[in-house]
Amino acid sequence: MIIYLHGFRSSPQSYKARSLKQHMESLGLGSLFWCEALPYSPLDAIALIETQIAASSTPVTLVGSSLGGYYATYLAEKHSIKAALINPAVVAHLSLADYVGPQTNLYTNEVFDFSEAHIDALRTMEVTTLSTPQHFLLLVETGDEVLDYRQAVEKYKGCEQVVLEGGDHSFTQFDAYRDQIIAFAETGPIHLPTTG
């Protein structure tokens, strides 16, 4: 089961979420994909994701973008499961501190209040040391204009990493790496060619 976690102010309508869903459906794996709108409250978002993890009858791999990557790191460590991280927020309570106040969802135009309590909740989820680096796949683009990719490269040292020149925060080359994500999750019949 792949559980996709979208980013701050994003939704299941984001390009990456829709692209991965459609690709898995084309491979006959549609029933093994889950993505729903995450609550704006970090604690509520974690509770929703954990309910889905518990309900899954197959091993879960989290795929998290930006803030979703931060959530995925916390939950992968807590539940000893895999996580693929796409331009992840490394220290979300710091990178989102400037966003306290009214915010608008980029897809639904819904307005919500992002509070200091939300920042405090994010602080409690910070993972300072990865206990199982092999559980993580990091995908970043150096042109990320929102987050410094070098922080992620350092944080996830020892993990499988894909570092691509250029791009932006949306991870522009996502489609080329969908099969690698599925193979990492060991969800379906994807066999990537070996090199060397």
Image (tube, helix red, strand yellow):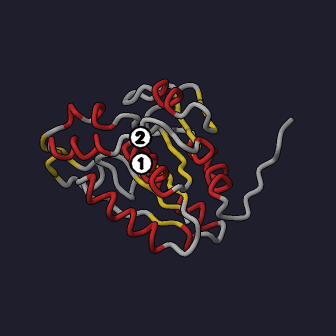
- Which mark is drawn over residue 127? 2
**x, y percent for residue 11:** 35, 55
Q: Amino acid at mark 2?
A: Val
Residue under pointer 1: 74
Number of numbered tags placed on the structure image: 2
Q: Are circles 1 and 2 on residues that touch, CB within 8 Å? A: yes
Q: Secondary structure at mark 1?
A: helix
Q: Amino acid at mark 1?
A: Tyr
**x, y percent for residue 183:** 68, 55
* Left or right: 171 as drawn, with respect to 39: right
Residue farthest along the right direction in this orientation: 196
Q: Is residue 28 visible?
A: yes
The residue drawn where x is 51% and y is 40% is: 130
**x, y percent for residue 15:** 45, 51
Q: Quadrant of the C terminus?
A: top right
Q: Is residue 82 above or below residue 163?
A: below
| Crowdedness near tag 1: few (<14), some (14–19) or many (≥20) residues, C-alpha within 10 Å | many
Q: Secondary structure at mark 2?
A: loop
**x, y percent for residue 147:** 39, 29
The residue drawn where x is 64% and y is 63% is: 187
